Image (tube, grey):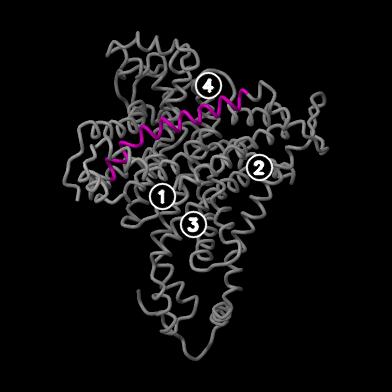
Amino acid sequence: MHSERASWGLRIAAWGGLLFLHFPILIILIYAFSTEDAAFSFPPQGFTLRWFAVTFARPDVLEAIRLSLQVAALATLIAMVLGTLAAAALYRRDFFGKEGVSLLLILPIALPGIITGLALLAAFKQLGIEPGVFTIVVGHATFCVVIVYNNVIARFRRTSYSLIEASMDLGADGWQTFRYIILPNLSSALLAGGMLAFALSFDEIIVTTFTAGHEKTLPIWLLNQLARPRDVPVTNVVAMLVMLATMLPILIAYYLTKGGEGVAGSGK
Amino acid sequence: MRPAPAPRESVSPLRQLADVLYRRPNLYLALLLVPPLLWFGVVYLGSLLGLLWQSFYTFDDFTMAVTPELTLANLKALFQPANFDIILRTLAMAIAVTIASAALAFPIAYHMARYTSGKTKAFFYIAVMLPMWASYIVKAYAWTLLLAKGGVAQWFLEALHLQPLLQFVLGIPGVGGSTLSTSHLGRFGVFVYIWLPFMILPIQAALERLPPSLLQASADLGATPWQTFRTVVLPLSVPGIAAGSIFTFSLTLGDFIVPQLIGPPGYFIGSMVYAQQGAIGNMPMAAAFTLVPIALIAVYLSIVKRLGAFDAL
């Protein structure tokens, strides 16, 4: 098939593009260990692990990490339930308004985050709900549902329906079929979708700035640091941790759904 | 997959319920749909419509109060020169970023689709996915480090003795600025970097579906590689490019973090929305500003739909 080799120009452009994509990430990894405590100079003067200790002794950092983990966990949980329900409803049935429902699920990631964020903020204000953890979770869950939905519906489509019919023929009722046939089939797709939703929520900043009130998730903490470049080393360490926290779930999700189409690539 | 045990004698209430649901598929469907529909149809869509409605509310400049008297003043204000400039600036950036992303993404996608297989393809796939999902705010932060005075970009330019070129580029009006990190060019580069992976994957998917026999046929019929590229490969990859451009266009249009961190002062649509609702407290005007990206994206989607973008998503 691919017997011919790529021309040099194409190969350089492709590998150069990959280098461009990874270079800034590499910079973040390097700077987290830099010995300097104020400047951005390059190349770094030396390497140290000191800043990790400093970072983990900071109560504001720990509090932001705790809040981000809490929000991401709750949003992921809601997204997994709603996304699976929507996928189960939409994958084999045809009904009036089906297109509309799937469009509605995609809308929060298709529209810019400012619109979702501002719309939710306006609604919370009208209803007199104080911004806080609850409102952040509502915002995050709204755009995380489609991630789980995409993964689960892709798995549903690849699962033969005859498995379910066979289970019913053998005398299992709906619950048993769900428990012993559907759920085990879905589990890795669900887990992958959950991982991606978690990463997405953990990192989200645009919707969050509108719905967070005075709460500071880790990305908001980072953004505030950038406006006031006081303790650069702590910012660098946190940046590296956030980077890893969002990249590792992608790797895991990739291996969980390997060999299947319709995984995460459908966009944030 | 082990066979489910089937209790014979006692029929549990759970089983009865399951049987009822099985016999009434419409009831079952309704039960599945109610929770997501409540969330999306009521909470989300309700908020969106509420926001649109608020863009017609009146904001009193003196008392700083919002009253529910309907007016078209906010929509008219969008066309005032100052506001219209913001819209044009954001739109121009979104278009420039989309074109540049497509140009940069194409070789990567083409190489992935045609010249890699097995392990190499998986490697490329992950190598594109990781930067795509890596934290957005950290990527933006990395660029403030890269472009800062004395930072990595400057070090490279000095090592390659390219400062005169940099000075020349920064001197071009509308593109440059006083330093890299406060120039239009810098902001443009960061946008392209952050949204590039969203362009690569749809193009790669479209090229993946391109049968190699078409290219062989084109070569057999005497086309040069360039002719094959222009008349066969490029037209067939248009749906992928269009699909990717939805992301680059829409994401640039609504962003307010990158314009805040990198580039010259001056509002983008997103930063204007943020400032209007936050510092100024003018929710109706903020709501009116969100209509701009909604309208632009609606127009854009209707264009790319004709190019086959939705089949390539």
Choose the circle earlier in sequence order: 3 or 1: 3
Tags 3 and 4 both on a single chain: yes
Choose the circle earlier in sequence order: 3 or 4: 3
Q: Which residue occupies 36% across, 27% down?
A: A50
Q: Main secondary structure of the magenta part?
A: helix
Three-letter amino acid code of the residue under disc 1? Ala
Q: Which residue occupies 24% across, 40% down?
A: B223
Q: Residues within 10 Å of mark 3 (few under 14, many from 20)?
A: many
State how far apart marks 2 and 4 are (Cα): 29 Å
Mark 1, residue position: A264
Residues at discs 3 and 4 in contact (Cβ within 8 Å)? no
Tags 2 and 4 both on a single chain: yes
Mark 2, residue position: A119
State how far apart marks 3 and 4 are (Cα): 39 Å
* Residue A149: mark: 3
Q: Position of residue A163 (x, y in %)?
A: 39, 75
Chain letter of disc 2 in the image: A
